Image: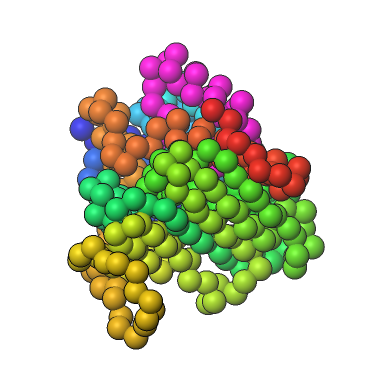
Amino acid sequence: MTIKWGVIGAGGIARRRTIPEVIQYAQNSVIKAVMDPNPQSLAEIQKEFNLEAAFTTLEEILKEDLDAVYIASPVFAHFEQAVQSLQAGKNVLCEKPLSLSIREGEEMAEIAEKKKLKLGIAFMMRFNVYHQKIKTLIDDHQLGKIVAARAQLTCWYPPIQNAWRQIPQLSGGGALADMGCHCLDLLEYFLGNITATVGFLDTTVHPYQVEDTANVILKFESEAQAMVDNYFNVPDKAANNLLEIYGTKGAILTKNTIGQDPGGTMWLYQEKEEKNYDAQQSRKKISYQLVELKPSPLYAQEIDAFSQWISTGVKPKPDLSAAIGIRNLKVLDSIYRSAKEKKVVEVTK
Ligand SMILES: NC(=O)c1ccc[n+]([C@@H]2O[C@H](COP(=O)([O-])OP(=O)(O)OC[C@H]3O[C@@H](n4cnc5c(N)ncnc54)[C@H](O)[C@@H]3O)[C@@H](O)[C@H]2O)c1
């Protein structure tokens, strides 16, 4: 069954990644209509992708015969648009962060439940082939007990007049809410629930109100500890977007698997035999092995997974359901409170 999609907020990530990937690679999803309040960009998008229908208002697109909508508008618009879309009988896949507050996210999920519709969160990085491999290695206990991890995502983001991301009331936060949410989600995907956080958030370079620097320490239910770091003030070409995971029997290091491109580079170390303490501590031999896997486009995979969920009623793996987006909001909320109150803050259950 092919699922008919509408796109709400078509001019940013949807135009750059999601729409072209769905057109080129999706198996069970088709884009039937787009909506964007900017008429010029809307006309360009319709022409660029040869789309049947394009609208400047939500009311118009919701009258179309669509099974699902993908909401890729600025964060402040997610709640209202998701609620209206669900009320109009559409399944909803929403971009990250799910909403501006936990309460809004929970209300969206309650409405979806009542209407017996699917509500999902677009954490497409879960679909990266290396992240899938990492999940399997961890779940199969191939790295032993996971004790520590680190996830990083940065981009150079200078001041731009009226940019919604730079206004806290419209975005919900800066580098952490925007990029850190992916890191936090990936770490919860790999390691389970985060229970407590400590955050240092500052605006150290750019003259806007949201944080351009975020360093966070996390504690997990599993007893693992982890760090997340996100910057809006480091050159793109300097970014490594590192992911590190350390267990008692091995470790993983990746470069640029966290990001919008599929792929990246991954190294794996697995301890072959039990060892005693090595007083010599020589680091001369390279112990990590390169792991090479075939990447697939992330956004097409996530849209197809959501379509599959609609068609079969079976939750996709990886899970994209609203509960994942709500947990992410709770972790973000704990970090923002920690930074403000200068203390360790438990994540709301
Ligand atoms: N998963 C990812 O890789 C990824 C990457 C970038 C952005 N995002 C998320 O996607 C969403 C959009 O971010 P972006 O970078 O594309 O932003 P953007 O500002 O580049 O583009 C947003 C688009 O939405 C339109 N828009 C503005 N107000 C609107 C409204 N009220 N209703 C509908 N459309 C509206 C704008 O005209 C523009 O075309 C955010 O939630 C962001 O966090 C996700």
Image height of 154 relative to 222, above or below: below
Q: Residue at x 56, y 64 (%)?
A: 154
Is residue 112 inside the magenta stretch? yes
Q: Position of residue 230 (x, y in %)?
A: 59, 60
Q: Which image quarter: residue 143?
A: bottom left
Q: Position of residue 302 (x, y in %)?
A: 34, 45
Image height of 294 relative to 304, above or below: below
Q: Which image quarter: residue 343?
A: top right
Q: Position of residue 74 (x, y in %)?
A: 60, 44
Residue furthest to the top: 114
| Residue 122 in view of the camera | no
- Apparent side of residue 276 relative to residue 195 in the rendered image (left or right): left
Is residue 169 inside the magenta stretch? no
Please name whichever residue, 273 or 197, is drawn nearer the observer in this view of the structure: 273
- Quarter of the image that includes the C terminus: top right
Q: Residue at x 60, y 45 (%)?
A: 197
Image height of 213 relative to 255, above or below: above
- Apparent side of residue 252 relative to residue 152 in the rendered image (left or right): left
Q: Residue at x 75, y 65 (%)?
A: 204
Image height of 90 relative to 230, above or below: above
Point out the stretch of residues depicted in magenta.
93-120
| Residue 143 in view of the camera | yes
- Apparent side of residue 302 relative to residue 227 in the rendered image (left or right): left
Q: Residue at x 37, y 66 (%)?
A: 253
Residue furthest to the bottom: 284
